[in-house]
Amino acid sequence: MLPLLVSSQIREADAYTIANEPISSIDLMERASKAFVGWFVNHFQDKEQAISVYCGTGNNGGDGLAIARLLCEHSFCNLSVFVARFSEKATANFQTNLERLKAANIQVNELTSGAELPSETAEIIIDALLGSGLNKPLAGDYKKLVEHLNTIDATKVAVDVPTGFYTEGDIPDDATVLKADLVITFQLPKINFLLPESAAFMHKCEVVQIGLSQDFLCQVDTTYYYIEEQDIRQIYKARGRFSHKGTYGHALIIAGKDETMGAALLSSSACAHAGAGLTTACIPQRGLTALNSYQPEVMVVLRESDKLPEVDWDKFTTIGVGPGIGKGDDTLALLKAISEKFNKPIVVDADALNVLAGNNELLAKLPKASVITPHMKEFDRLFGEHKNWWQRLQTAKKKAIELGLHIILKNDFTITAAPNGKLYFNSTGNPAMASGGMGDVLTGIITALLSQTYSPLHACLLGVYLHGKAGDELALPNRMQVVLPGAIIKQLPVTMAKFNS
Ligand SMILES: NC(=O)C1=CN([C@@H]2O[C@H](COP(=O)(O)OP(=O)(O)OC[C@H]3O[C@@H](n4cnc5c(N)ncnc54)[C@H](O)[C@@H]3O)[C@@H](O)[C@H]2O)[C@@H](O)CC1
Ligand SMILES: [K+]
């Protein structure tokens, strides 16, 4: 899995690569710039377009100068290059690339103050002012220049990081940041790119490889990982010959009330489709006809609102509890019963989480290594208000360790916080999946995977990935704006089939 690094570790990765490949620092910059230009020329093919490249005087600026030279070599000759000379400091690689640019007869315009900014008519602006070296909010001349660029109606492409954007940590509410249409970033997505606060500053992000040392990336000590298809292939277990329904466990889904039976139908149907050997739904009597019609494969234990259902707990491999179950005392009683009588990992979602929020002591009593699947509001109800997603990540890590739970924090890049203190970002899913019932499906899938004896961590990573992947397979080829949970359920076996090879 891809480690995600904070900026100090990115600098270490650069330095390690330079020392051990070995490669000179200026050649690594040339490689990064070529990777940027390689992507750029494939996607922006009109060589007559006016392009302005804005460069700082650090290594991000050095990249910008190299990119300008390389674009000229690719016959993009309608180029203007600006250097923001707002301080005396300049890196050696910046200086070398400035000389190379001048040797190539490309004119460079120096900006010495934010008060005198060029009127800009370029169709594309390349932002190479500041990158991962940002260490304070933009102020003074830099702030003025970025504010000015933000008013210009051009396609803005940021080199590595939009100027002013913090790659990790809190982003101040009033931060001035270049609003990029596209970020072409080097080697790894930056952690804050995967959090919702980035949406205001980048429309799209592409990662290009610059050959940072794999040895370094394999051994680096990080909290953050990005899960890709190759990781899922390693986790996924194809079914063996001579296996039978008993091999894949018996899952119990406790869900639904009279008026919210849909949640029970979706979660238990998803559980059956994701491969539980047997699925039983614990539902109210009035949902029975609906369940039998919607998914006859699912068995039933009936539940009355004022007393605990008669469940033979030992019969089940795992439990998924919460979708549409209501926030009443009966849910609290059920959660207490589960924590006393069941000791294998379970999945807790939706209303059950809201009940836990009012009875925090029960969280610690859930079966060890269980999975909770809050969305942002449920997460804040459980663990307190957070002012941003970076803070939420830190709480998720702390609570996962403290409670010995897996916390799936649902989002665009859904995050699994594990009791080992690591945070895993999922890479599938799309906005067409933003609709009610989608979480119920996820609960069903993860319950099914636990039932098939995946470890809780693998059940989380695989479940979240498959859920998003099914949505991508349905929505992306057809540019669909909406994919309903029921469609995801039907797609699941198709999505899983692709991992059998
Ligand atoms: N060999 C390397 O280290 C490589 C670096 N690369 C590029 O280098 C970039 C990082 O370069 P640098 O570390 O030189 O940093 P930047 O170029 O991002 O920033 C330059 C300097 O600006 C100053 N600064 C920080 N915040 C500021 C602010 N708010 N206002 C004004 N000045 C500020 C800092 O002193 C910083 O070192 C990456 O984003 C990437 O583009 C790539 O070329 C790949 C290889
Ligand atoms: K930049």
Image: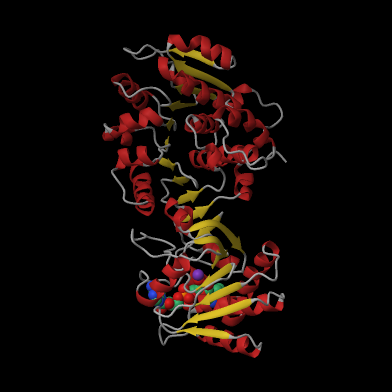
Res. 22 visible in picture: no
Left or right of residue 13, residue 88 in this image: left
- Whether residue 235 is situated above or below residue 286 in the rendered picture: below
Left or right of residue 28, residue 116 in this image: left
Q: Residue at x 44, y 70 (%)?
A: 148
For the N terminus, the quadrant is: bottom right
Considering depth in this image, is 256 or 234 the residue closer to the camera? Answer: 256
Q: Residue at x 55, y 17 (%)?
A: 298
Considering depth in this image, is 73 or 38 the residue closer to the camera? Answer: 73
Considering depth in this image, is 21 or 110 the residue closer to the camera? Answer: 110
- Whether residue 171 is situated above or below residue 260 in the rendered picture: below
- Whether residue 67 is situated above or below residue 375 in the rendered picture: below
Residue 13 position in % (x across, y down): 52, 70
For the C terminus, the quadrant is: top right
Q: Residue at x 51, y 20 (%)?
A: 265
Residue 262 position in % (x across, y down): 48, 21
| Coloring scheme used | secondary structure
The image quadrant that residue 486 belongs to is top right
Residue 159 position in % (x across, y down): 54, 69
- Whether residue 9 is situated above or below residue 198 in the rendered picture: below
Res. 449 visible in picture: yes
Q: How many marks?
A: 0
Q: Residue at x 58, y 34 (%)?
A: 483
Residue 491 position in % (x across, y down): 64, 31
Considering depth in this image, is 280 or 241 the residue closer to the camera? Answer: 280
The image quadrant that residue 75 belongs to is bottom right
